[in-house]
Image (tube, rainbow, N blue to C red):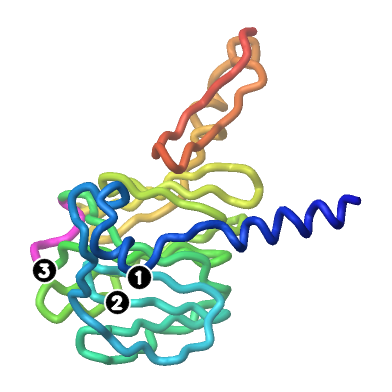
């Protein structure tokens, strides 16, 4: 009986009344209230690539492909395929962001951050050539990243171990070197100085990706 019902529901769905292409792309005003036409701005040929993960970086006209430990960029405006490098662990995510002020000079406006299973690496983007610049910003990750947020130059990652980390990157001009590390607000050095009797109980760290919110909540002690 259930199989027959499922068959009938599936058939009814397949035979439902559908919009024609003409209705969708030209005259269907209730689907497109402002723009009734979809206009292609450009067409690009994309090479066949073997990949585990991929994404697009429109600011650089780049499609990135990650396969195991390898990362490559396809620049679709110039039809060039560029092999970036081979990492020590699998690439998880690649993203672009505007770094905090005072970190780089005017030669770099955008940065690329690469998340692998064991590292976070930041590259600069040359304003003129759009080439990657090695910034020596790299830090280890104790657990595999599974999600991330970048907002106003601040980088947060959620890891497989259930923790959320802030990626701290600094330029120490007085010492002439760069510093990068992960900071977990739930296990900071300062919290170790607070007496156990004054600490809040059942504290939890949470992140809301769609709303770009990171917060702590706890029960009353």
Q: Secondary structure at mark 3?
A: loop
Residue at numbered disc 3: 107
**In percent of the image, x 44 and y 80: which residue is there?**
71
For residue 69, say whether it is visible: no
Residue 218 falls in image quadrant: top right
Q: Secondary structure at mark 1?
A: strand
**In percent of the image, x 39 and y 39: which residue is there?**
212
Is 176 in front, or is 217?
A: 217
Residue at numbered disc 2: 62
Is 208 in front, or is 199?
A: 208
Q: Secondary structure at mark 2?
A: strand
**How many marks on residues?**
3
Q: Does residue 39 sit above or below 45 in this rendering?
A: above
Residue at numbered disc 1: 56
Q: Position of residue 220 (x, y in %)?
A: 61, 8
Q: Position of residue 221 (x, y in %)?
A: 64, 8
In magenta, the rendered stretch is 102-106
**In percent of the image, x 20 and y 70: which residue is there?**
39
């Amino acid at each position: 009986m259930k199989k027959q019902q499922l068959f009938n529901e599936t058939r009814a769905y397949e035979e439902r009344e559908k919009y024609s292409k003409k209705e969708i792309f030209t005259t269907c005003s209730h689907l497109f209230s402002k723009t009734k036409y979809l206009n292609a701005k450009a067409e690009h040929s994309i090479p066949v690539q073997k990949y585990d993960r991929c994404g697009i970086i429109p600011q650089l006209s780049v499609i990135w492909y990650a396969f195991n430990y390898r990362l490559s960029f396809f620049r679709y405006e110039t039809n060039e395929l560029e092999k970036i490098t081979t990492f020590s662990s699998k690439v998880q995510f690649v993203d672009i962001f505007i770094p905090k002020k005072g970190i780089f000079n005017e030669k770099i406006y955008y940065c690329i951050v690469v998340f692998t299973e064991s590292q976070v690496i930041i590259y600069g983007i040359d304003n003129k050539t759009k080439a990657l610049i090695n910034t020596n910003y790299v830090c280890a990750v104790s657990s595999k990243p599974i999600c991330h947020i970048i907002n106003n130059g601040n980088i947060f990652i959620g890891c497989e171990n259930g923790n959320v980390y802030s990626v701290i990157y600094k330029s120490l001009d007085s010492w002439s070197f760069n510093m990068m590390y992960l900071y977990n607000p739930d296990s900071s050095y300062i919290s170790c100085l607070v007496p156990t009797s004054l600490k809040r109980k059942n504290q939890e760290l949470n992140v809301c990706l769609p709303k770009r919110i990171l917060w702590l909540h706890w029960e009353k002690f």
